[in-house]
Amino acid sequence: SSRTARSEEDRDSLWDAWGSWSECSRTCGGGASYSLRRCLSSKTCEGRNIRYRTCSNVDCPPEAGDFRAQQCSAHNDVKYQGQFYEWLPVSNDPDNPCSLKCQARGAALVVELAPKVLDGTRCYTESLDMCISGLCQIVGCDRQLGSTVKEDNCGVCNGDGSTCRLVRGQYKSQLSANKLDDTVVAIPYGSRQVRLVLKGPDHLYLETKTLQGVKSENSLSSTGSFLVDNSSVDFQKFPDKEILRISGPLTADFTIKIRYVGAADSSVQFIFYQPIVHRWRETDFFPCSASCGGGYQLTSAECFDLRSNRVVADQYCHYYPENIKPKPKLQECNLDPCPASDGYKQIMPYDLYHPLPRWESTPWTACSSSCGGGIQSRSVSCVEEDIQGHISPVEEWKCMYTPKMPVVQPCNIFDCPKWLAQEWSPCTVTCGQGLRYRVVLCIDHRGMHTGGCSPKTKPHIKEECIVPTPCYKTKEKLPVEAKLPWYKQAQELEEGAVVSEEPSFIPEAWSTCSVTCGVGSQVRLVKCQVLLSFSQSVADLPIDECEGPKPVSQRACYSGPCSGEATEYTPEETELLYGSLQEFDELYDWEYEGFTECSESCGGGVQEAVVTCLNKQTRETADETLCVTSRRPPQLLKACSLGPCPPR
């Protein structure tokens, strides 16, 4: 280690000291500054002779414009190929984000006007990463080079997502003869990651109101990106839908409205992160309860409006379940003894300090029910703490300056898990009596596959079924215990898709068959959903947010032949009846087993080959209905008793 330390000292001693930092490349919006050092050796020094740091990490005023756009416009008064152009920036180049590429206004001409942008230019519009000496360098939300720290969904650098809440919902239009528009949702100041998707013929538009009370309206008449009260809005208009995105934070209160255009209904899905603008703030200590001889003083908590910077009523903070009111702090004060002349201890007036008596509660009892709504209780008492920290119960009236905490509250109000039976499979036979199967899942209140359902109430997964088609012969074994794919599915209770933190398609259960006999159809709803990591809740997303093939939302179903119909099947019915029976090809098959007796004892007769259905594993004779998926071998005849008959 001593040799290593000496080698590092020798290496550093070849360099001169670092020079002072250069002027920042920008005055706002995040720039770069550098420092140089000189190699003192005649040989090559190890390490770099330049280092960088970020600077001017304050937001630029809105009128300052884009830094890359300023660099493009600097070439407006320089002729390109003998002609003047007004140059606009080309951003987010995936191949070389740190070159200055610009496009001529009103033309398709794109030119690289400089191999490098100025230091401090953002590599990409939605990133803090910056170009330094022509290379894109990582910048964290703490504005430090090489930092990987990121903002949470609330916009707090390296935050835990506790300063905002996810809001999501759906609006469905309600047409009325005397109503031309309606409010979809009000999105407050400071909200982030706003996304709305309208499906239908109607049209979205915006109303805004700044904190100063200035109101405005934007009709969202065409596709594009534009500023609304200094908030960047991205709007896409399609023939059958509209998509509105605002990364935020919003600089005003936004009201999203819908203008009715067509006779058909429209729906709007929305999702955004709303800041918690009312938060508890701890107060300073109140005046001491005594002027000498030892007293106490407490802190309290007040509800503070972050937008108006003023104290408001506690009810505003109670609105957010995420807000937890801090407990009061207690400390001793004025511990000097009172004057010996009279031993008088002056007590401060009652209304000048927060009184010591306070409500205390025991922990909540366990909920009386694990689901479906229960009750839990606790005991609440008024206590007082002396200077030595001893706590003792006192009369309740001493704590009546604050409301008494509730002693009972509801709990586990969500629905209990329940069994969900899916559609029956086709019958396992094509004639006579067989079995049919179905999948039975235990589903919780979120529609997820779970446990906890009572085995006593579980619907049965198989039952007998009769196909009104005559069989070739009377069956000897009923019912047929065939291990079909449906049986395996019913036994394993297939789980299906699970919501994850990546957007994925989640299909719901199939509807009942559209007909009671013959071939019909079943439908199901397939949603694009994502699991939100902070709130552990599931959010619905537009279908185009999910990648990969979308599960089918419609399929054919067969409910048996209708009464009075012939037993011939259509191609669709044949597929339904036999499509899932391919596994039987390897287990059951027709085989020849000898011949019948000769039809004549002499003079020439015939024998017919006997064909039976065999289980290829056990070599036992099986019911003929189990070989329905195999082709029955052709009838074989052979001559017999060819000798002449004796004369009569």
Image (tube, grey):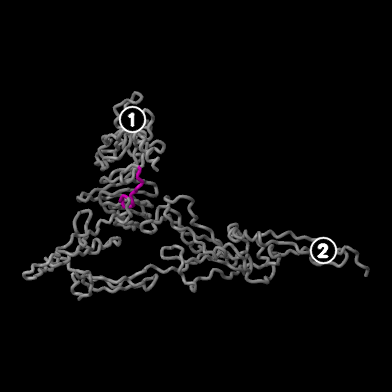
Q: Is residue 165 magenta?
A: no
Dot in front, 2 or 1? 1
Number of other residues with Cα within 10 Å of mark 1, as a class: few under 14, some 14 to 19, many 20 or more: few
Contact flag, marks 2 and 1 (Cβ < 8 Å):
no
On the image, numbered disc 1 is attached to which residue?
A: 40
Residue range (magenta)? 146-157
The residue sitting at the left extreme is 341
Instruction: Where is residue 132? Give x, y as percent.
Output: 34, 36
Report the label total.
Answer: 2
Which residue has dot 2 on it?
Answer: 606
Q: Residue furthest top?
A: 82
Q: Earlier in the sequence, mark 2 or mark 1?
A: 1
Is 433 left or right of 647, judged from the image as shown? left
Residue 409, placed above or below residue 50: below
- Residue 177 in percent (x, y) is at 31, 57
In depth, the one of 522 and 561 nearer the eye is: 522
Residue beneath the point at 29% across and 30% down: 74
Alpha carbon distance from label 2 to label 1: 115 Å
For the N terminus, the quadrant is: top left
Viewer-side residue, 408 vs 36? 36
Question: Judging from the image, what secondary structure is the residue with disc 1 in?
Answer: loop
User: Residue at left 27%, top 71%?
Assistant: 361
Whether residue 153 is in magenta: the answer is yes
Which residue is at the front of the view, 125 or 265?
125
Q: Is residue 647 visible?
A: yes
